[in-house]
Amino acid sequence: MQLIRAANTAAEFVKNPALALLPKQMSNTLEYAFPSTTVLFADVPFGRLAQVHIVYPETANRTRTFILLYGRIANSLLKRLLRKSLLAAASQVVEQDARAVESLYPREKPGVRLAKDEIMAYAERLFREWPLVSP
């Protein structure tokens, strides 16, 4: 999958210096393990990144997202400089995704289910039947 990045402002570069090292066009691979895990592999000029997202529904009203971020960065100086910036970028992606999902899906259950919606019904059933872990 080819991803073309939007132009960043100077304030965004100051807030997250890692943006300066990312190319305008990146080659990414997304792997999806239903129902809770996605992995994004990105080839960037300074190395290769793997970002693992694990979604864990804790309760009926709360879901946790865990991110594992792996990087094979060729330059050890860049590795030290980019560590916090890459983690901040991953955190921002989770926040943006959560806001997008909340705004896309209504909170009420639909009255009619179409044949093509069967996979979503299966995902909802898995979510509802997911074993709850008490703290």
Image (cartoon, rainbow, N blue to C red):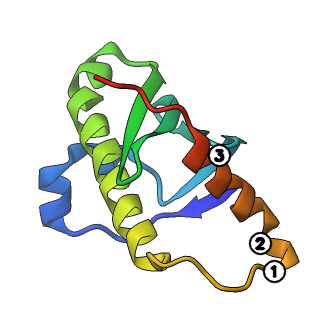
Location of mark 2 (residue):
117
- The mark nearer the N terminus, 2 or 3, is 2
Task: State the quadrant of the N terminus.
Answer: bottom right
Q: How crowded is mark 3: few (under 14 residues within 10 Å), some or many (20 or more)?
A: few
Could you tell me how far apart the alpha carbons at marks 2 and 1 are, in whole angstroms? 5 Å
Tag count in the figure?
A: 3
The image shows residue 58, relative to residue 6, as above or below, that is above
Task: State the quadrant of the C terminus.
Answer: top left
Closest to the observer: 7 or 68? 68
Tell me which corner region of the image, top left, top right, bottom left or bottom right, holds residue 81. Answer: top left
The image shows residue 97, relative to residue 133, as above or below, that is below
Closest to the observer: 49 or 127? 127
Which labelled disc corresponds to residue 86?
none
Could you tell me how far apart the alpha carbons at marks 2 and 3 are, in whole angstroms? 14 Å
The answer to the question of whether label 2 and label 1 lie on touching residues, with beta carbons closer than 8 A, is yes
- The mark nearer the N terminus, 1 or 3, is 1
Which labelled disc corresponds to residue 126?
3
Kind of element beneath mark 2? helix
Location of mark 1 (residue):
114
Q: Position of residue 3 (x, y in %)?
A: 58, 60
Residue sitting at 16 percent across and 65 percent down?
A: 10
Tell me which corner region of the image, top left, top right, bottom left or bottom right, holds residue 30. Answer: top right
User: Which amino acid, mark 3?
Assistant: Leu
Q: Where is residue 73 in the image (x, y as percent from the top left)?
A: 44, 22
